[in-house]
């Protein structure tokens, strides 16, 4: 029986990111080691270097993937449905849970010390901020309102992050419906 399984490059990258993300979700950054990831994936140490260039490269790839997997893509939606989709998607069970928060907190804690991760964070955040800003601007325009869409978007993103944190710390104190309502209440003076 072969010790290693051959996978396509794309599948191997995905497997390594899956394993790394599962470790972050389970035990934080201390689970993000070459030995733990390779053991869990059943691969040699050299495959991380081969596919990601370094552990920092893997960390950045995992961050990009977590961003894509947990932030709703608003671009294909009609302007009047984007904000509702953002709120619903931000508090969906796949996003609004302790394991996802564990991964986010572990990654956020490394941004200041890992240039590749900091660069990836900037790319992902700017793209997400642009989507949310455009969605708020389009909805405000459709409703005949004038707003600083970028300022409202930044505040909304921070509110969502904080509500997710509170929910994961104490789900009974911050249930999903209360979090959604807090977002709607924040937006109401700007968009209603």
Image (cartoon, rainbow, N blue to C red):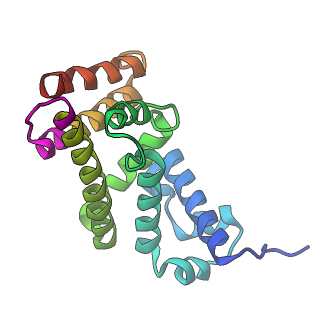
Instruction: Please tell me which residue is depicted at 36% across the width and 16% down the height of the picture.
Output: 173
User: Is residue 51 rendered to the left or right of residue 128?
Assistant: right
Closer to us: 146 or 31: 146
For the C terminus, the image quarter is: top left
Q: Is residue 123 above or below residue 186?
A: below
Instruction: Please tell me which residue is depicted at 46% across the width and 78% down the height of the picture.
Output: 54
Q: Main secondary structure of the magenta part?
A: helix
Residue 152 inside the magenta-drawn segment: yes
Residue 13 inside the magenta-drawn segment: no
Closer to us: 59 or 151: 151
Instruction: Please tell me which residue is depicted at 18% across the width and 44% down the height of the picture.
Output: 154
Instruction: Please tell me which residue is depicted at 29% across the width and 64% down the height of the picture.
Output: 123
User: Is residue 31 rendered to the left or right of residue 153?
Assistant: right
Q: Is residue 21 above or below residue 86?
A: below
Closer to us: 134 or 38: 134
User: Is residue 14 rendered to the left or right of residue 1?
Assistant: left
Q: Position of residue 191 (x, y in %)?
A: 17, 27
Q: Position of residue 187 (x, y in %)?
A: 20, 27
The residue at the far right in this view is 1
Please state the extent of the stretch shown in magenta in the rendering. Answer: 141-155
Q: Quadrant of residue 156?
A: top left
For the N terminus, the image quarter is: bottom right
Q: Quadrant of residue 78?
A: top left
Q: Position of residue 98 (x, y in %)?
A: 47, 35
User: Is residue 77 rendered to the left or right of residue 118?
Assistant: right
């Amino acid at each position: 029986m072969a010790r290693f399984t051959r996978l396509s490059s794309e599948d191997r990258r995905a497997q390594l990111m899956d394993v790394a993300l599962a470790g972050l979700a389970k035990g934080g950054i201390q689970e993000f080691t070459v030995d733990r990831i390779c053991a869990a994936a059943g691969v040699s140490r050299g495959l991380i270097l081969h596919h990601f260039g370094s552990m920092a490269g893997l960390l950045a790839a995992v961050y990009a993937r977590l961003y894509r997997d947990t932030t709703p893509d608003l671009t294909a939606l009609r302007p009047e449905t984007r904000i509702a989709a953002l709120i619903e998607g931000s508090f969906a069970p796949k996003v609004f849970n302790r394991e996802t928060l564990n991964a986010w907190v572990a990654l956020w804690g490394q941004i200041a010390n890992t240039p590749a991760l900091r660069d990836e964070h900037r790319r992902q955040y700017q793209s997400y901020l642009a989507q949310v800003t455009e969605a708020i601007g389009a909805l405000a325009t459709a409703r005949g309102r004038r707003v600083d869409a970028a300022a409202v978007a930044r505040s909304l993103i921070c509110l969502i992050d904080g509500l997710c944190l509170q929910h994961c710390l104490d789900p009974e104190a911050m249930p999903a419906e209360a979090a959604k309502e807090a977002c709607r209440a924040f937006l109401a003076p700007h968009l209603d």
